[in-house]
Structure formats: C-alpha cells, structure tokens
Amino acid sequence: MGAVRTNFYKLGETAVAGELDTLLGMVVEFDDCNYSANPATRKLNSGRRIKAMWIKNDSGSTLNVGECLTWKSGYAGTRVGGVTGSAGTGVGAVDPYVGSAGVADGKNFWMIIEGPGKARSAGSISANAILIPAATGEVTTVTNDAPGSLSACGRCVVAATGADESIDVLWKFPGY
C-alpha cells in the first residue's frame, strides 16, 4: 500500500519562500475542476486529472498564468528559472488558477506538467494542433518535421485567432 499524501495547497494557491520547501519536487494529481469557484458548488470540468509539481519561482520576476517554464540551472526538479525560449524544452506551465497577479519571485506554487490547463498563444493556432514553446513562454504550432518538434508539450483544445490569447490546452511536458 502506498503512502497517503495530503495537499496542503490547492491549485491557485502559493506559499511564501521557506514555507513547505521540504516538499519541493512533490508531484500530485488534482481533479479537473474550476478551483476559482466556491468549493461548495465546484463541479468537474472533465474526467481528466491535472498532474502538478510543487515548485519554487527562482526566476527573478513574476510568472504569469499559462507560461511555459524551464528549470533553474542546478535545481532541476525543485526550482524554475524563467520562461522557456523559442522551441526550447519546457518542463511545465504556470498554474491556471493563480490569477492575474501571477506567481511572484521566491514563491512556491503548483506547476502543471500534464492534463488540462491554460496557455498564451504566440499567434493563431488551430484546435487540436500540437504545441511547442515560443518566445516569452507562449506556445505556437509545430509540424512533425519542424525544428523544435521534439519539444512538443501539449495540444490546443480551443483555437486562438491571434497572439496573447489565453487558450485551453492539454499539457504533456517531456522535460520534467
């Protein structure tokens, strides 16, 4: 029988530096539901699960909802050092429920590594397109023969008509 893990923080919550640092790197699964809704009336969005890792933002700046992230050098599995560059290998995305304030530098948060989430588009993207990281943590489309296709990190659920749109995605990061 496996160990029972308690999630001290739900999706959308962050912790100050030093709080629960011993849990950095812990991977848990959450139901796919709207964590910004009242818990008494919260309903499932789908039957899928959201896999997330407890991580520290050590980037020197605020991270925003849906940005693709990369490890901090020397801290793989516990700290992120910023957003993934164009066609880089992403390791996860910022929790879609942290809100417009994002995740301040030094705070711990849930990084989404698999399942339903949000992303920011770098341009128009068709529904069901395979995604790779673009510049500044956004996502763009890829074809199997394009540079960066090995960095595929998810699939677009709802099409984007232009840049900087928040889109629904199914994440599956290869680099975590």
Image: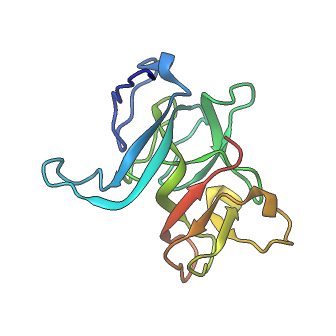
Residue 105 place in picture, x, y as percent = 52, 34
Q: How is the image coloured?
A: rainbow
Q: Residue at x 29, y 58 (%)?
A: 44
Q: Residue at x 51, y 48 (%)?
A: 94
> Considering the image in quadrants, where does the N terminus appear?
top left
> Considering the image in quadrants, where does the C terminus appear?
top right
Q: Is residue 14 above or below residue 90?
A: above
Is residue 113 left or right of 42 when viewed as pictured? right
Residue 163 place in picture, x, y as percent = 58, 74
Is residue 42 left or right of 28 when viewed as pictured? left
Residue 66 place in picture, x, y as percent = 51, 56
Q: Is residue 55 above or below residue 139?
A: above
In this view, the residue farthest toward the left is 40
Q: Is residue 61 above or below residue 75?
A: below
Q: Residue at x 39, y 28 (%)?
A: 15
Residue 10 place in picture, x, y as percent = 33, 38
Q: Quadrant of residue 91?
A: top right
Q: Is residue 52 above or below residue 121?
A: above
Would residue 95 be seen by someone viewing this image from the given angle? no
Number of labels in the image equals: 0
In this view, the residue farthest toward the front is 1
Would residue 125 be seen by someone viewing this image from the given angle? yes
